[in-house]
């Protein structure tokens, strides 16, 4: 039986030359970032590309990157990370954690208003908490708040949170965006109209949403940290990275996430853009639906891992703009266990393991049957992400060598999430996780986090891992927690929840007319309200209202 799919070399060559790839330079073109010393002025728009549309503009419900791109400008949490990765106040002007870690008192800012002019108070914080623990609300974040013993309002601008046992990420989790009580009270939050017409406290106010086209936000003149200089923040839906790059060349987009070949493209392509590159706090993986056979057998996943040469992906798809993943923590995390070895590539051993599981080539056609029946499975990933598409094709070719037949399905992102992931209608997926700085991954891998909108949609179930995640989140001492996370990674090496493929680099291009960009450990967007464009370089003009 012949395959009409591209072989690995052809896939790699196609990727390399897709945008006139050139390996001539790897420098970051940041010399113009702060070269304009004139005073900041108001005006202009910032247009950023997104591969897919938002799902909800409600931070309690949304869990996808596309939604977060918008929500981060509309809403605030009680705390946030500053540019140097330290937790600081956001809607809370200050906070005090008890010595035993069981109580947090938040002093709220008194000068904050919702975008409709209603004052922000402690009632909104309590309402958000009660929404998050409501079993009827389809949120993936409930496990961070159901462990709270009591929530008390001291006065209009002071709240006390009481835990019945230590919870290490307690403070970080209050970076959760706060939603307005007066907007949602009395409505089913899962279907509320405000999910498409949000009211927040953030630097930008919602203006309009054209489904699958763009979302427009406008500067909030009453923002408690000051009105942003950029008048409008626009998320343009461009569901293909190749098309995004073409739009970049026409300067119709101000910022895009670059693919590896685009990063290395001829310098002339970036005449009007600065490039920024840093390791992403994320991993990309091949995951299996463990509710289906034979994906529920760890030996099958281990065999698939032995048959996949990750170096082909790192070199051919990422062009070395990332590293091989060995577990759920990237190297810059303090929980990363460097003693875990890289995956072994051994197709022969993989074939032997599959034979033990009941796989054999009965028809002598090069394809394996499983327990006497024809076997094949489908790898699904989201449309527009060229790295994931090409990774799927490389995996397909590598598994073909050991007789495993696979299909590759590419689906629009929101359909992928809502129809396939949420309903568990998939065999295997190639996806990525963006991670929080705290290494608590209870919601990703704990066996109780498998409800339709929860994150353990692979249905991983390891009682020892469950217990260790429960223990780690109840301990504040970092060194003790580190030992626990190291142990989790040791277990996952032998009982993997998925096949960890790579830790990608984050590569951004931003138009050079934007001044005030201050690259920092947390990234470049931490001070977006301070970005500005000189009047002589502004391209979009809006009347003040």
Image (tube, rainbow, N blue to C red):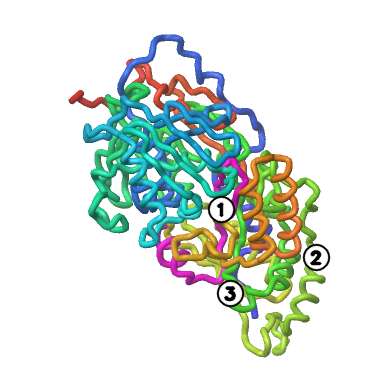
Is residue 441 one of those drawn in magenta? yes
**Which structural element holds mark 1?**
strand
The C terminus - image quarter: top left
Task: Inspect this view and state whether residue 147 appears.
Answer: yes
CA distance separating discs 3 and 1: 20 Å
Comparing labels 3 and 1, the label whose residue is closer to the camera: 1
**Which structural element holds mark 2?**
loop
* Quarter of the view holding residue 302: bottom right
Comparing labels 1 and 2, the label whose residue is closer to the camera: 1
Horizontal and vertical percent for residue 166?
59, 46
The residue carrying mark 1 is 432
- Residue at left offset 72%, top offset 82%: 359
Horizontal and vertical percent for residue 226?
34, 21
The residue carrying mark 3 is 377
- Tell me, for residue 346, which label it has, or none: 2
CA distance separating discs 1 and 2: 25 Å
**Which structural element holds mark 3?**
strand
Q: Which residues are magenta?
A: 414-442
In the drawing, does residue 161 fall left or right of residue 27? left
Q: Nearer the viewer, residue 42 or 204?
A: 204
Is residue 448 one of those drawn in magenta? no
């Amino acid at each position: 039986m012949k395959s009409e799919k591209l072989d690995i070399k052809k896939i790699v060559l196609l990727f390399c030359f897709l945008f006139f790839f050139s390996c001539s330079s790897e420098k970051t073109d940041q010399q113009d970032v702060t070269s304009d010393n004139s005073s900041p002025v108001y005006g202009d728009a910032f247009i950023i590309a997104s591969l897919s549309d938002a799902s909800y503009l409600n931070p309690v419900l949304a869990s996808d990157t596309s939604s977060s791109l918008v929500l981060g400008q509309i809403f605030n949490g009680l705390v946030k990370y500053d540019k140097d990765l330290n937790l600081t106040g956001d809607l809370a002007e200050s906070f005090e954690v008890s010595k035993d870690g069981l109580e947090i008192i938040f002093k709220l800012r008194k000068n904050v208003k919702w975008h409709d002019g209603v004052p922000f108070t402690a009632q909104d914080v309590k309402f958000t908490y009660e929404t998050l623990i409501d079993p009827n609300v389809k949120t993936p974040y409930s496990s961070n708040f159901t462990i709270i013993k009591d929530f008390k309002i001291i006065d209009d601008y002071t709240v006390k949170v009481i835990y019945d046992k230590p919870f290490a990420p307690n403070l970080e989790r209050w970076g959760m965006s706060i939603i307005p009580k007066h907007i949602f009270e009395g409505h089913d939050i899962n279907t509320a109209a405000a999910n498409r017409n949000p009211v927040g406290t953030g630097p930008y106010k919602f203006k309009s949403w054209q489904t699958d086209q763009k979302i427009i936000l406008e500067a909030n003149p009453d923002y408690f940290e000051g009105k942003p200089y950029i008048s409008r923040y626009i998320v343009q839906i461009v569901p293909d990275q190749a098309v995004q790059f073409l739009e970049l060349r026409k300067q119709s987009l101000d910022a895009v996430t670059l693919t590896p070949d685009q990063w290395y493209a001829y310098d002339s392509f970036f005449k009007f853009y600065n490039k920024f590159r840093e390791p992403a706090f994320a991993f990309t993986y091949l995951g299996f639906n463990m509710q289906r056979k034979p994906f529920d057998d760890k030996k099958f996943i281990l065999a698939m891992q032995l048959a996949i040469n990750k170096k082909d992906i790192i070199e051919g798809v990422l062009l070395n703009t990332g590293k091989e993943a060995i577990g759920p923590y990237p190297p810059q995390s303090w929980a990363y266990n460097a003693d875990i070895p890289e995956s072994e590539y051994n197709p022969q051993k993989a074939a032997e393991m599959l034979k033990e599981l009941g796989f054999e080539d009965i028809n002598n056609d090069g394809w394996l049957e499983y327990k006497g029946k024809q076997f094949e499975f489908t790898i699904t990933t989201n449309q527009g992400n060229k790295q994931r598409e090409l990774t799927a094709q490389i995996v397909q070719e590598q598994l073909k060598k050991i007789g495993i037949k696979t299909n590759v399905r590419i689906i629009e992102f929101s359909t992928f999430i809502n129809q396939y992931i949420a309903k568990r209608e998939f065999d295997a997926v190639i996806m990525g996780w963006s991670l929080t700085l705290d290494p608590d991954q209870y919601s990703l891998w704990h066996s109780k986090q498998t409800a339709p909108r929860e994150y353990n949609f692979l249905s991983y179930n390891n009682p020892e891992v469950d217990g260790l995640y429960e223990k780690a989140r109840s301990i504040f001492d970092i060194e003790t927690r580190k030992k626990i996370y190291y142990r989790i990674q040791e277990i996952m090496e032998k009982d993997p929840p998925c096949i960890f493929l790579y830790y990608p680099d984050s590569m951004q291009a931003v138009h050079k007319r934007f001044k005030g960009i201050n690259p920092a450990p947390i990234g470049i967007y931490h001070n977006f309200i301070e970005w500005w464009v000189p009047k002589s370089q502004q391209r979009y003009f809006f009347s003040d209202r």
